[in-house]
């Protein structure tokens, strides 16, 4: 066999060899992408480039040997390359599945090429249908990718479609130019540019998927780490972010365990009614497939409605939500284009599902703790109220019974003094003085147990009376300033504020070593703000530390104030002394 190449064909063979090497490089690239991401369309693209390299091998062998059989296989593999590229684009953009009738289309290249090579003598009649088939298949590939761009907004798919449209036009010049040797070897180099454009487009699609998917999932990851909003907020964030994925028209969170197994707890987009209607059969099939493998699964459609399941979505993707080793649920995503997790690795998605599961578990724990805290606050408020009721009862009994008895004793002692012996007068006067002292002590105790002045005069006069009495009994210079009009407070809030001022004044005397106390009462943020400042030594290690460490009066003050929805703060005044801040809400304000 003479393997020499005609001089005229030498440059053509060199160009074909060079194109073959580049084509095999593209095939290897797609194989690597397939092994990395496990997506079927990368495998089809790799197969398309292998077939294209085979086509180049056939034409090179034909140029060496002149055997018509190699020209036949060159024609066949040319058609199969176009079909493989079309199939890869359809699998990528629509998630189509193989059907036996598609084999008829794949049989066209070998059938027509046989007639064109061995039976037809007219060149245009032989080459025309083949070139038209090749151009239509390539243009269809471009249209599939352009349609995908229109659905999801993919610049990479749009650029790839433009390359394919131009390549389809380039195919049409074959009967007029390249078959007659006019463009040799430049036709090979032009095809090579189109190949490189397609390869670059495939890489850009991968990068685009990675960027969009990672940005969406990392944004959700950031939201899961932010402030606690309750489990409803986390669920809404998960579904909303899933809905932002390219080509996604609906998302829902399905629970497989916990308090409500087998229910859709939240849906958005076309899945908004699933919480009421339940999981559709096609979505349930995708969830069951995911449950058996515990990795993300995609139920592909053909691009049209699935008649058997009445399912109008080309794909249904499920992402497992894991809590430790337990499968807690699934994030179900449906769309009109393709698998939204295209370029994201399975390990990344599984790890993300674990993060979502942990966030949901944390939020449930947070909700449980919040409910427990509410219960404790309610019990604390009830306990304080019971303490006040008991104080009121004891105060009433001391006032109505003990004080009255002592008053009667005092009257009897007075009668005895008037009727008795002169020698008993001094003793009776002393006894009456002791009884009077006891009555005054009981009145002081009853006033401390239950400040009736609150009920009789109201909050502001009661606070002024407390300050006046305290200043009279103790060597302190006390200034009291109340500015503005004050909103109405609940009885519990008024009592808590009164007790707080009482405790703050007592602390200035016991611990402050001060001579001056300034008291300010003002309206602030829909409530009443009390500030007590002294010129004493202040707190040794900061007010907040003292508040956290306290188990006595300050702790009781905080319990009373928080029970009515307020807060207590400690700090340092302008002169270095102690400063106490107490805030309570107005009656018509809800404080969380």
Image (cartoon, grey):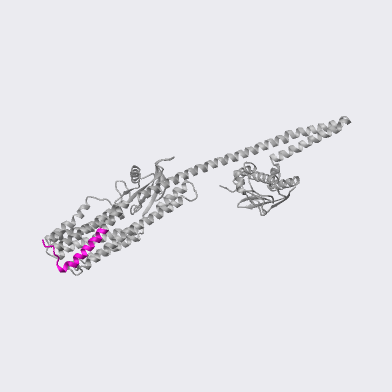
Relative image position of residue 468 (x, y in whole percent): 74, 47
Q: Is residue 154 left or right of residue 182?
A: right
Q: Is residue 78 left or right of residue 33?
A: left
Relative image position of residue 488 (x, y in whole percent): 64, 48
- Residue at 82% across, 34% down: 430
- Vertically, is 574 above or below 178? above
373 inside magenta stretch: no
The segment highlighted magenta reads 1-25
**Dominant secondary structure of the residues highlighted in magenta in the image:** helix
Q: Look at the image and tell me whether residue 171 can be seen.
A: yes
23 inside magenta stretch: yes
- Residue at 52% across, 43% down: 370
Q: Is residue 431 left or right of residue 297?
A: right
- Residue at 30% across, 49% down: 306
- Vertically, is 440 above or below 101? above
Q: In which quadrant of the rendered view does residue 441 lie? A: top right
Residue most extreme to the right = 422
Q: Is residue 470 left or right of residue 142?
A: right
Q: Look at the image and tell me whether residue 303 can be seen.
A: no
Q: Give the number of callouts.
A: 0
Identify which residue, 265 or 422, lies in the foreground: 422
Relative image position of residue 57 (x, y in whole percent): 19, 59
């Amino acid at each position: 066999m003479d393997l020499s190449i005609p001089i005229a064909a030498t440059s053509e063979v060199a160009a074909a060899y060079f194109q073959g090497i580049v084509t095999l490089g593209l095939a290897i690239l797609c194989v690597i992408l397939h092994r990395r991401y496990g997506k079927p369309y990368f495998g089809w693209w790799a197969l398309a480039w292998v077939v294209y390299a085979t086509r180049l091998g056939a034409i090179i062998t034909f140029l060496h040997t002149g055997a018509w059989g190699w020209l036949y296989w060159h024609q066949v593999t040319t058609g199969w390359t176009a079909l493989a590229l079309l199939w890869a684009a359809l699998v990528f953009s629509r998630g189509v599945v193989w059907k036996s009738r598609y084999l008829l289309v794949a049989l066209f290249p070998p059938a027509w090429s046989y007639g064109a090579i061995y039976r037809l003598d007219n060149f245009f009649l032989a080459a025309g249908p083949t070139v038209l088939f090749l151009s239509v298949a390539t243009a269809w590939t471009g249209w599939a990718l352009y349609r995908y761009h229109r659905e999801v907004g993919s610049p990479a798919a749009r650029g790839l479609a433009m390359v394919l449209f131009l390549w389809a036009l380039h195919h049409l010049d074959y009967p007029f130019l390249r078959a007659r040797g006019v463009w040799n070897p430049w036709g090979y180099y032009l095809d090579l540019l189109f190949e490189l454009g397609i390869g670059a487009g495939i890489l850009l699609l991968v990068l685009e998927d990675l960027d969009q998917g990672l940005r969406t999932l990392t944004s959700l990851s950031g939201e899961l780490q932010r402030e606690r909003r309750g489990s409803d907020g986390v669920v809404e964030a998960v579904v909303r972010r899933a809905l932002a994925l390219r080509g996604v028209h609906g998302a829902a969170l399905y629970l497989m365990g916990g308090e409500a197994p087998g229910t859709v707890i939240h849906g958005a987009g076309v899945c908004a009614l699933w919480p009421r209607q339940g999981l559709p059969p096609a979505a349930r099939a995708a969830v069951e497939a995911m449950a058996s493998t515990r990795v993300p699964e995609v139920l592909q459609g053909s691009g049209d409605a699935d008649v058997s399941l009445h399912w109008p979505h080309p794909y249904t993707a499920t992402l497992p939500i894991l809590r430790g080793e337990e499968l807690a649920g699934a994030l179900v995503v449906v769309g009109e284009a393709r698998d939204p997790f295209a370029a994201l690795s399975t390990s990344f998605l599984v790890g993300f599902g674990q993060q979502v599961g942990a966030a949901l578990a944390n939020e449930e724990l947070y909700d449980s703790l919040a409910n427990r805290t509410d219960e404790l606050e309610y019990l604390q408020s009830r306990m304080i109220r019971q303490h006040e009721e008991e104080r009121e009862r004891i105060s009433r009994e001391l006032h109505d019974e003990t004080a009255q008895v002592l008053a009667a004793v005092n009257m009897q002692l007075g009668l005895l003094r008037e009727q008795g012996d002169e020698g008993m007068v001094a003793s009776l006067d002393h006894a009456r003085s002791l009884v009077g002292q006891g009555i005054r002590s009981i009145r002081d105790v009853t006033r401390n147990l239950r400040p009736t002045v609150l009920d009789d005069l109201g909050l502001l006069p009661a606070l002024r009376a407390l300050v006046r009495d305290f200043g009279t009994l103790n060597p302190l210079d006390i200034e009291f300033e109340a500015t503005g009009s004050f909103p109405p407070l609940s009885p519990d809030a008024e009592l808590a504020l009164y007790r707080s001022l009482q405790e703050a004044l007592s602390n200035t005397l016991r611990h402050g070593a001060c001579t001056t106390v300034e008291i300010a009462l003002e309206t602030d943020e829909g409530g009443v703000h009390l500030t007590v400042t002294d010129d004493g030594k202040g707190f040794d290690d900061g007010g907040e530390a003292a508040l956290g460490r306290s188990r006595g009066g300050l702790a009781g003050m905080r319990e009373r104030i928080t029970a009515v929805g307020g807060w207590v703060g400690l700090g340092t005044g302008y002169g270095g002394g102690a400063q106490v801040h107490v805030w309570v809400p107005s009656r018509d304000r809800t404080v969380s």
